Amino acid sequence: MEAIIEKSFEIEEPIEKVWANLSKPMEIASCVPGAAITQQIDDTHYKGEVKLKFGPIKAQYDGDIEMVELDSSAYRMVMSGKGLDSKGKGSADMKMNGDLQSSDKGTHVNFKMTVTIVGTLAQFGSRLINDVSDQLLNQFIANFKAQLAGQEFDNNLSAGSMMVSVLKSKIGGIFKGKDESAS
């Protein structure tokens, strides 16, 4: 099952400050709900984990992260990640392209992420994965903005938001007259 997530947002900070934080995987990982970098292998390779739990759905992925491209002059990055479910029931691959642009409000951030999931989580379908990913990204953005402002934040997964996504996905599938969990 593959999901493509595209997101753009504004940050009221200068592009140099945003890039300085965004280009440091050890710092930025703390903004990702449920994620942590557990080891830095070299300048571009890391080991990490992601723990997700919302309702009856639990998953933990242990994996590898690579900074494929980090272009400071163009404010562009490409990152890839591969993880295995700690219970051996699936895997996930991710590729993210991101770029920053100066704007009247500070910095405009664009990114596109392609996530491929195999195994237990894939059975929930692309609609649910997209809805949950959107909630995770919204929480990441709020955490990242707080980090830039020097404020404290919580990178624990917001389970309430996730349950709303699960319900929204299931109810949406019922009203459309088809079961989207089979996607």
Image (cartoon, rainbow, N blue to C red):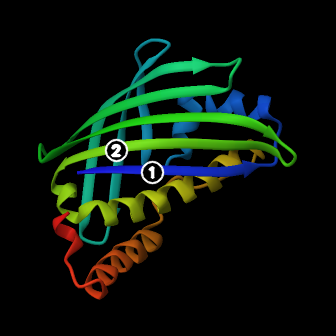
The structure residue drawn at horizontal position 49% and vertical position 42%, both measured from the top left corner, is 112
Q: Is residue 70 left or right of residue 54?
A: right
Dot 1: what SS?
strand
Identify the image quadrant of the C terminus.
bottom left
The structure residue drawn at horizontal position 81% and vertical position 48%, both measured from the top left corner, is 12
Dot 2: what SS?
strand
Within 10 Å of disc 1 (Cα), the crowding (few <14, some 14-19, many 20+) is: some
Q: Do tag 2 and tag 1 residues touch (Cβ < 8 Å)?
A: yes
Q: Is residue 178 above or below residue 106?
A: below
Q: Quadrant of residue 110?
A: top right
Mark number for residue 115?
Answer: 2
Number of disc labels: 2
Residue 13 x, y percent position in the rendering: 82, 42
Q: Is residue 4 above or below residue 82?
A: below
The residue that mark 1 highlights is 5
Q: Is residue 172 left or right of residue 155?
A: left
